[in-house]
Image: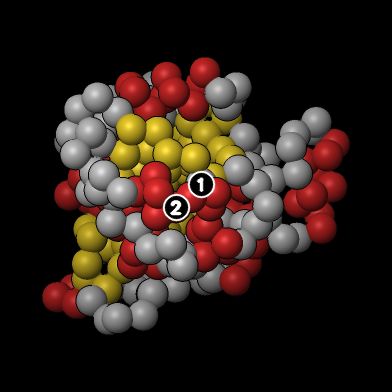
Amino acid sequence: MQTIISAAVSLDGYLDDTAPQRLMLSSPEDYAAVGRLRAQVDAILIGAETLRRDNPSLATRDPVCFELRQKRGLAPHPLKIVVTRSGRLSQSARFFHEGDGEKLVICGADADPELEERLGVLAEVWRGPHREVSVDEIVDLIGARGVKTLLVEGGAHMIGGFLAAGMADYLRLAIAPVMLGARGRARLWDHLPPDLFAGERAELSKSEQFGDTLALTYRLK
């Protein structure tokens, strides 16, 4: 399975700030580029905190993306996946209601015992045997479902887990020209393996400018 990690960060490495509303760090041009990236993959994965904080739909809407997926022989919509330890997920989240693709919730053994009943037909629930679901378990599970390309879009803990496990092939960082400082929240830099950019583990393969956002794509070894 090929796994791509995509994140938008401030210059000092934060994914968000402490304001109640979601902070948009990507420029409109970069956001469109990420949409095209989503159109190329079989599945998109986020952690539960990202779902609760950002309330993303992860839905494919652009007709160009549908056309691209059709040309590649892909299903019209990627599989959408959220990973949760507690099962504290709102049934009203956009993730469950926008877009016609399949939805999968991966949770730990101690997650809300009523999760399957609460979600009903909104999503399939897979419950692991342990309190924490490992990255290896996630990859094995979705690989068995035929997923060949996976896009991981957050949050910091989930991204760090994939990188620490050596389960990522590419890392795409969209860097916004802002410093968040004390108002920053979820600092991605704190979750990256300390040797990620040391030696030859990460090789810069592409640098693109999207409006005021610089997108750097690294090939990981």
Three-letter code, disc 1:
Ala
Q: Secondary structure at mark 1?
A: loop
Asked if the residue under mark 2 is in contact with the one under mark 1, i.e. CB atoms within 8 Å, the reply is yes
Q: Between residues 10 and 205, which one lies in front from this camera angle?
A: 10
Say left or right for 56 vs 16: right
Image colouring: secondary structure
Quarter containing the C terminus? top left
Q: Give the residue drawn at x 52%, y 57%.
A: 96
Q: Is residue 108 visible?
A: yes
Q: Residue furthest left?
A: 182
Residue 80's quadrant in the figure? Answer: top right
Count the marks: 2
Q: Between residues 193 and 210, which one lies in front from this camera angle?
A: 193
Q: Give the residue drawn at x 34%, y 48%.
A: 115
Q: Give the residue drawn at x 85%, y 36%.
A: 71
Residue 133, horizontal then vertical, whole percent: 27, 31
Residue 19, horizontal then vertical, whole percent: 27, 81
Say left or right for 42 vs 90: right
Decide: few, some or many residues near mark 2? Use Cα within 10 Å; few <14, some 14-19, many ≥20: some
Q: Secondary structure at mark 2?
A: helix
Decide: few, some or many residues near mark 1? Use Cα within 10 Å; few <14, some 14-19, many ≥20: some
Q: CA distance from mark 1 to mark 2?
A: 6 Å
Placement of 98 over or under 119, stated as above or below? below
Residue 85, horizontal then vertical, whole percent: 24, 44
Residue 38, horizontal then vertical, whole percent: 62, 47
Three-letter code, disc 2:
Leu
> Badge 2 is on which residue?
119
Disc ID at residue 123: 1
Q: Give the residue drawn at x 27%, y 73%.
A: 17
